[in-house]
Amino acid sequence: MPAMMKAAVFVEPNRIEIDDRPIPDIGPNDALVRVTTTTICGTDVHILKGEYPVEKGLIVGHEPVGVIEKLGANVQGYQEGQRVIAGAICPSFTSYACQDGCSSQDGGHHAHGYKPMGGWRFGNTIDGAQAEYLCVPDAQANLSPVPDGLTDDQVLMCPDIMSTGFAGAESASIKIGDSVAIFAQGPIGLCATAGARLRGAGLIIAVDGVDERLDMARKMGADVTLNFREVDVVSEIFKLTGGRGVDASIEALGLQQTFEQALRVIKPGGTLSSLGVYSENLTIPLDAFCAGLGDHRIVTSLCPGGKERMRRLMQIIDSGRVDLGPMVTHRYPLEKIVDAYDLFSHQRDGVLKVALEVL
């Protein structure tokens, strides 16, 4: 009988439960990682609610921090017992998308058309990280050693939230001195705020409706915070920019309202960098879009993955340029993950990120 482990399993919409599962077998290019800490992402909540479809019985989660338990025969340069992370997106670097410079879309091309987000495998197309053990595919491309002295909490944001938020700032092509408005200061928006500061933005405007999140945004680098419940955000941003509009906006929630506001506040020739996961059709207002003649750029990003991306993010943390540890506001053991999902999905008690302590 195979050795068993505890894992969080998608049973049906509105039901994710702890179950006993066999510890995964690994192939020659894989690694078995003993998970020490993981977390819950907003995308997991979309899965929980049935807004994003995955197979029933799938182990969910895509943000692993852990220790190498076993290495496949072909995986070189790592040791069992080594602390590692793997990105939420774990590309093979052999697909057409990867070799065309878009590794997050790995595997997206096939004979019957294009399936986006092919690089997102954990908790999407294969078993994920909210478990005691995780099989990491293409481990040579995706395992990244954790620098000595960094805690699990410090690197917990790297696999997804930090990589995604920073990608929003990178895709916005922020230049030194740019003005940037970031809509929604949940975990991804906060990381986008930190990324805008690192990119050299001269004016960072953070928008949210929760004062505690706006306080955290200031710690992450926001110069001005706007509570949309108290001010007309669009008119306020035009005042702050002398009527010019911002050079770039970043949408980090996935709602029509925030997308539309992010479009309205950019200057002619500005960029809207969209990070939100949208669960309904978007409508682009004709006036805000300048009938298609505003020289606007609307760009989307899926979390970049791979070991080099993870190494760079951990380097930023190790150098002290950003500290995302304060974003961990709550802790639960893996066995209490149903309670953690209830807290996180209902956004109670000032939750930003939950550390799920596994072993």
Image (tube, grey):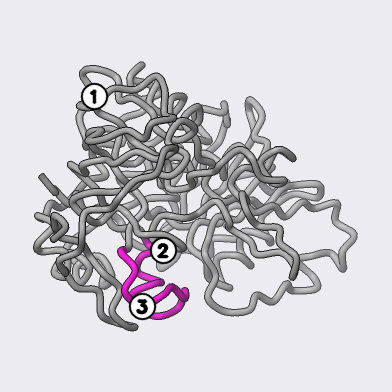
Element carrying mark 1: loop
Magenta span main SS: loop
The label on residue 114 is none
Examine the rendered structure and indicate whether residue 4 appears above or below residue 327. below
Q: Quadrant of residue 112?
A: bottom right
Residue 221: percent from the left, percent from the top? 42, 34
* Quarter of the image where the C terminus is located: top left
Q: What's the residue type where badge 1 is placed?
A: Leu
* Quarter of the image where the N terminus is located: bottom left
Examine the rendered structure and indicate whether residue 279 appears above or below residue 5. below
Q: CA distance from mark 3 to mark 2?
A: 16 Å
Say which label, 2 or 1, has the lower sequence index.
2
Query: Seen in the image, is 333 located left or right of residue 216?
Result: left
Residue under numbered circle 3: 56
Query: Seen in the image, is 30 located left or right of residue 93?
Result: left
Examine the rendered structure and indicate whether residue 328 appears above or below residue 77. below
Residue extending furthest bottom? Answer: 13
Q: Residues within 10 Å of mark 3 (few under 14, many from 20)?
A: few
Q: What's the residue type where badge 2 is placed?
A: Thr
Element carrying mark 2: helix
Q: What's the residue type where badge 3 is placed?
A: Lys
Residue under numbered circle 1: 150
Q: Residues within 10 Å of mark 1 (few under 14, many from 20)?
A: few
Front one among 115 and 209: 115
Span shown in magenta: 42-59
Q: In percent of the image, x 20 and y 29: which residue is there?
A: 151
Determine if the magenta segment contains residue 177: no
Residue under numbered circle 2: 43
Residue 214: percent from the left, percent from the top? 35, 50
Front one among 125 and 310: 125
Element carrying mark 3: loop
**Tally of numbered discs:** 3
